[in-house]
Image: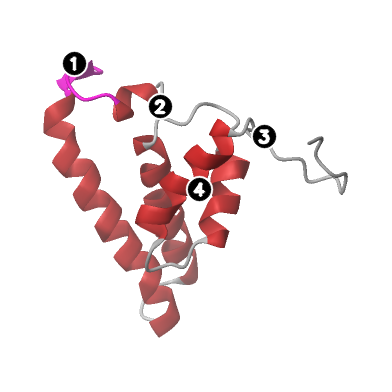
Amino acid sequence: MSPRLFAARGGYVLGIPADSLTNILDEAQRYLAWLGALRELGTVRPWAAVVAADLAERIRWRALGAGRGAGRLLWMCGRMATPELATRLVPRLWRAARDRGRGRPRLDGRRPAS
């Protein structure tokens, strides 16, 4: 399924009106983030908290319409933002990097060409 299907409003996603999925994705993101936060309290199994937190983050990323290969950049943006402000800062950091042509950061120790 294309990430652009989640970013665009209107139309259909697998035969379901995209507007009806907006509330589901918003609520799922909050619920999964809450489950991920429970890891710190030790009230859920560690694997459940990790998976829930990862899914919540991926839903946020899908809402940006990021294409294949953008995960590393989005992950880096998420680590630069504080958790409280991540929902606002990650999209801004991601767009700023993309506007500067930094779509796929290298992790091999070499410096990027300026």
**Which quarter of the rendering shows the N terminus?**
top left
Measure how far apart labels 3 and 2 are at the Cα level: 17 Å
Q: Earlier in the sequence, mark 4 or mark 3?
A: 4
Q: Main secondary structure of the magenta part?
A: loop
Residue where numbered disc 1 is placed:
11
* Amino acid under disc 4: Leu
Q: Position of residue 55 (x, y in %)?
A: 41, 49
- Residue at 47%, 31% in the rendered image: 66
* Amino acid under disc 2: Pro
Q: Where is residue 54 in the image (x, y as percent from the top left)?
A: 46, 53
Residue range in magenta is 8-17
Residue where numbered disc 2 is placed:
3
Q: Earlier in the sequence, mark 2 or mark 4?
A: 2
Q: Which of marks 2 and 1 is nearer the N terminus?
A: 2
Q: Does the magenta stretch include residue 69?
A: no
- Local crowd size for mark 2, using a 10 Å CA cut-off: few (<14), some (14–19), many (≥20): some
- Relative to 83, 72 lies left or right: right
Which mark lies nearer to you, 4 or 3? Answer: 4
Q: Position of residue 43 (x, y in %)?
A: 36, 80
Q: Which of marks 3 and 2 is nearer the N terminus?
A: 2
Q: In this view, does 6 lie above or below 22?
A: above
* Helix, strand or loop under label 1: loop
Q: Earlier in the sequence, mark 3 or mark 1?
A: 1
Measure how far apart labels 4 and 3 are at the Cα level: 14 Å
Residue 57, numbered label: none
Measure how far apart labels 1 and 4 are at the Cα level: 28 Å
Residue where numbered disc 3 is placed:
104
Measure how far apart labels 2 and 4 are at the Cα level: 18 Å
Q: Earlier in the sequence, mark 1 or mark 4?
A: 1
Residue where numbered disc 4 is placed:
93
- Relative to 47, 112 lies left or right: right
